[in-house]
Image (cartoon, grey):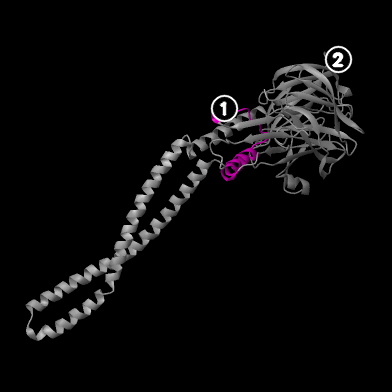
Amino acid sequence: WMCLWFEEEEMESEENLLNAYLLLLLLGSHFTLVGPSTPEEGWQVYSSAQDSEGRCVCTVVAPQQTICSRDARTKQLRQLLEKVQNMSQSIEALDQRTQRDLQFVEKMEVQLKGLENKFKQVEDGHETNIARQYKSIKAKMEELRPLIPVLEAYKADALLVRQFKEEAANVTELLGSLQEQLGGLDYQELHSRVVSLEDRLKACMQRLACGKLTGISEPITIKTSGSRFGSWMTDPLAPTGDNRVWYMDGYHNNRFVREYHSMFDFMMTENFTSHRLPHPWSGTGQVVYNGSLYFNKFQSHTIIKFDFSTSLISRSRQLDFAGYNNMYHYSWGGHSDIDLMVDEGGLWAVYATNQNAGNIVLSQLNPNSLQIIRSWTTNHPKRSAGEAFMICGTLYVTNGYSGGTKVYYAYSTNSSTYEYIDIPLTNKYSHLSMLDYNPRDRALYAWNNGHQVLYNVTLYHIIQ
């Protein structure tokens, strides 16, 4: 969902091939930067966390002193390599030709043996047979006559092959000497450097898994369906190729969840399965995580984990002291007291308690046991929040759900601090009742007045 830009300095043929390979490596990774390389490696690598438009920028310059094609020694080496290649092709052609000539020689040997037998028959035979045997010998000699130039050509070819072999040996020795002058730089060394760079790119990609929200795109309307309130989502931990979409219309007194095979099927309202939950849900704060649905049981502070593969409840647990039944809802109402969400760090619950004076409490949950791992108390009133979502351990809160909307409050669980921000959020259909982040897609899923929409996000990455 974010752009990756790759800048290169102008190079010649060998470097272009190498950089094309590096570019393929970069395009196979998301949000990839590289750290500075050591001088011994010969690479000049520069990185920037973000450009003026929030895009990740990476500049890689390959070694210029040892393999640059402008170097006279490199040109000489390339010419010699081409010469050896041409010689190898010529030797191959000559080998085929001599093999063909060898067949004539073998044929000649058979005919000579036949001639020898004929002479023996003349010596042992009677005089009356001399004339007939002589005619036969003469015919055999006529058959042998065309083989004489073939033998001469074969001898010349054999001599040429020996000369080529000697020249190839001399060139090989010269190449070895030139390679030593170039510092022993060969394919294996180039390959090891490419592998090393790829490892650094992957390591940096891991460090760039999280960032700070700096922008939200215009909404992309995927579908128009359902009532004014609802939720829809994909599984951020789904394996590659699993693009199922889940759809839950309404915010209470409903038990049916639709599972679409793909985003296209969801858009076309085709190829779906209905799951009947054992209890109705409350609000629109449901999430699908690692093949299970997590939802708030209607008119309770109970969290339920429903396994889609077995159609059974695999775990349930009360969220102690959490307000429910429209006690501490978002500003739009709708039994939105408990909002479950997922980010890069796992499963979270956003709610409010009397003990925290109705302000937002943020708890990280164990997705298997539903036990609270840790909680943070904020100073933001739950009822004043329009919607909220988590990105990289930071809770982002909107100032409302209708009209002009923006993300204006951020609470970081990493530092236990908050700040007021100003990130516009286009509220195209004027009523947000669900806004959740998907870390796999790096996008916000929203239910906006009966429209299912997506927002791309821009994250600012800081290299530690």
Q: Is residue 187 magenta?
A: no
Find disc 2 in the rendering and name its residue. Answer: 357
Query: Foreground: 277 or 166?
Result: 166
Mark 2: give few (<14), some (14-19) or many (20+) Cα within 10 Å.
Answer: few
Q: Position of residue 10 (x, y in %)?
A: 65, 41
Residue 60 image label: none
Find disc 1 in the rendering and name its residue. Answer: 39
**Which quadrant would the C terminus be assigned to in this image?**
top right
Q: Is residue 20 magenta?
A: yes
Label 1 amino acid? Pro
Structural distance between the alpha carbons of marks 1 and 2: 58 Å
Mark 1: give few (<14), some (14-19) or many (20+) Cα within 10 Å.
Answer: few
| Residue found 46% across the figure and 47% down from its top | 80
**Which quadrant would the N terminus be assigned to in this image?**
top right
Label 2 amino acid? Ala
Q: Is residue 114 above or below residue 42?
A: below
Q: Position of residue 139 (x, y in %)?
A: 22, 80
Query: Foreground: 169 or 436?
Result: 169
Name which quarter of the figure residue 371 lies in: top right
163 left or right, relative to 306: left
1 or 2: tag closer to the N-terminus: 1
357 left or right, relative to 137: right
Taken as a whole, is the magenta stretch helix, strand or loop? helix
Q: Residue furthest front?
A: 72
Q: Position of residue 399 (x, y in %)?
A: 88, 27
Q: How many marks?
A: 2
| Residue found 73% across the figure and 29% down from its top | 342
Q: Position of residue 462 (x, y in %)?
A: 71, 25
Q: Is residue 337 visible?
A: yes
Q: Magenta segment, which residues? A: 12-41
Say what secondary structure mark 2 lies in. Answer: loop
